[in-house]
Image (spheres, grey):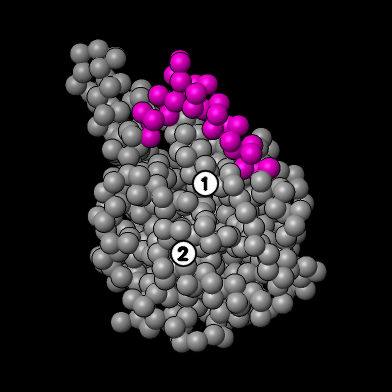
Amino acid sequence: MNLTSLSLTGLKNLLQKKEVKAQEVVQAYLERIEEMEPQINSFITVLGDRSLEEAGRIDRKKSPGNLAGIPLAIKDNMVIQGLRSTCGSKILENYKGSYTASAVEKLMKQDAAIIGKTNLDEFAMGSSTENSAFYITRNPWDRKRVPGGSSGGSAAAVASGEAPAALGSDTGGSIRQPAAFCGLVGFKPTYGRVSRYGLIAFASSLDQIGPITKTVEDSAFLTQLIAGRDPQDSTSSSHPVPQYPEEMKKDLKSMRVGYLKQEMLEGIDPEVKEIYSHSLGYLEDLGAELQELSFPVWKYGLFCYYIIAPCEASSNLARYDGVRYGFRHNKAPDLSQMYENTRTEGFGSEVKRRILLGTFALSAGYYEAYYVKAAKTRDLIRKEFEDAFQKVDFIVTPTTPDLPFLIGAKKDPISMYLSDWFTAPVSLAGIPALSLPVGFSQKKLPVGLQIIGNFFQESNLFKLAFRLEKKVKLSGPNLHRKEEE
């Protein structure tokens, strides 16, 4: 039996029936990591001996938790006590967490065996995982291409069989876009649904932790485990957490689905557009009532995002000055020069670019012209979604406008930012969204469909995604997962 080909749910069933031991499962994944890492570079830190020891402890328990020793990968912007948490940056290269992020701690309490910390675009700023200070992560479907970002390491680890599931973080699309590029399910919950405590901040009003998995059922299961109110995070919600895996299999009372007007699809890859149209047909086959929607403010979402997110990054990253922790330049004549040298050497070009953009937009004389207008536009985007959900229960869009692109193909930052065209407005509104693999291009590159729900309607999102996933898997051979070489 190839344990690394199983879904999280499949592994859970084997472990709970005692048909396999946790140490056997962890060992199988460590061997897979050893085989694949030279080609993929998914991980920054692999916790080999530690995860095996943890699996042995779990094997000895009479009543293990819901995860029963399943190995999970964690994006390296979530701190774990005593382990390196680099955020993909030189400035935090040797930083070790003094506590554990709430979402990760919840998984550990359910006896997850954390197998490693995954690579990412530095401080989660990017759409390709080319901006890591350490190395580029490659897409397992085509190693000349990017896996998406910023959670590209997490997505590549799951797609290459190095982990059955992983946690990522999503600020403007950083779970959904790499999930789409790697043929996986990526879920961004409602803002506040999952605690951000222990997530190294990029943009605090946008950041959200979520799972990257092989199936919708796995996504629902992990979300249920990490969701809920956390007193350590004042922005986390006390909204009740349903049993998502059970709710997912119940009937949907309504399936009114909104889709985008053709004018909103101009400029996207023709194959992405074609597969999006096919997906609407699958939804109709499931009994969905389709309704074309217009979103006049949507087109401002990306520009709004790239003002608000850099402004918050400028504030959040001010703490990395070489004084208390992290990288420090020691050969400076005075304190001011030490600050400058530390940040110049410690941050990569994309992080510097966004800090400068944010600092400029927040500066005297520009704050009203840029940040305040962006904040007002954000309110309009949220209102536009609220109005749309008076007419429909779900909204579907392509997850990304492009197919997975070649490493180095997008040297212009603006072309890279356009990868967030369909995902950033959703983040600004704070509503949940799931990327589901729904097809392949002629070159066998995965394509994702973004399913958007109303605030705290995660249960319904999983219900629709679960049904559509089954429909897609029963469709033609062009939608089947490519056999490993």
Badge 1 amino acid: Lys
- Magenta-drawn stretch contains 380: yes
Q: Residue at x 24, y 24 (%)?
A: 341
Q: Residue at x 21, y 18 (%)?
A: 332
Give residue 11's position: percent from left, percent from top: 55, 75
Closer to us: 464 or 60: 464
Give residue 360's position: percent from left, percent from top: 40, 24
Q: Which quadrant is home to the C terminus?
A: bottom left
Q: Residues within 10 Å of mark 1 (few under 14, many from 20)?
A: some
Q: Which quadrant is home to the N terminus?
A: bottom left
Q: Please state which of the two labelled residues, at mark 2 or mark 1, is closer to the viewer.
A: 1
Q: Which residue is mark 2?
A: 180
Badge 2 amino acid: Ala
Specify start and end residues of the magenta stretch as a single range.
354-383
Q: Which of the marked residues, 2 or 1, is nearer the chain's N terminus?
A: 2
The reply to whether discs 2 and 1 touch (Cβ–Cβ < 8 Å) is no
Residue 234: image tag: none
- Disc 2 and disc 1: Cα gap in Å? 21 Å
Count of labels in the image:
2
Q: Residue at x 66, y 52 (%)?
A: 227
Q: Is residue 483 visible?
A: yes
Q: Residue at x 60, y 69 (%)?
A: 216
Q: Which residue is mark 1?
A: 299
Location of residue 157 by image quarter: bottom left
Q: Is residue 82 above or below residue 288?
A: above
Q: Is residue 325 above or below residue 175?
A: above
Q: Residues within 10 Å of mark 2 (few under 14, many from 20)?
A: many
Q: Is residue 154 visible?
A: no
Give residue 164's position: percent from left, percent from top: 48, 69
Give residue 303's position: percent from left, percent from top: 47, 40
| Residue furthest top in the image | 334
SS at circle 2 = helix
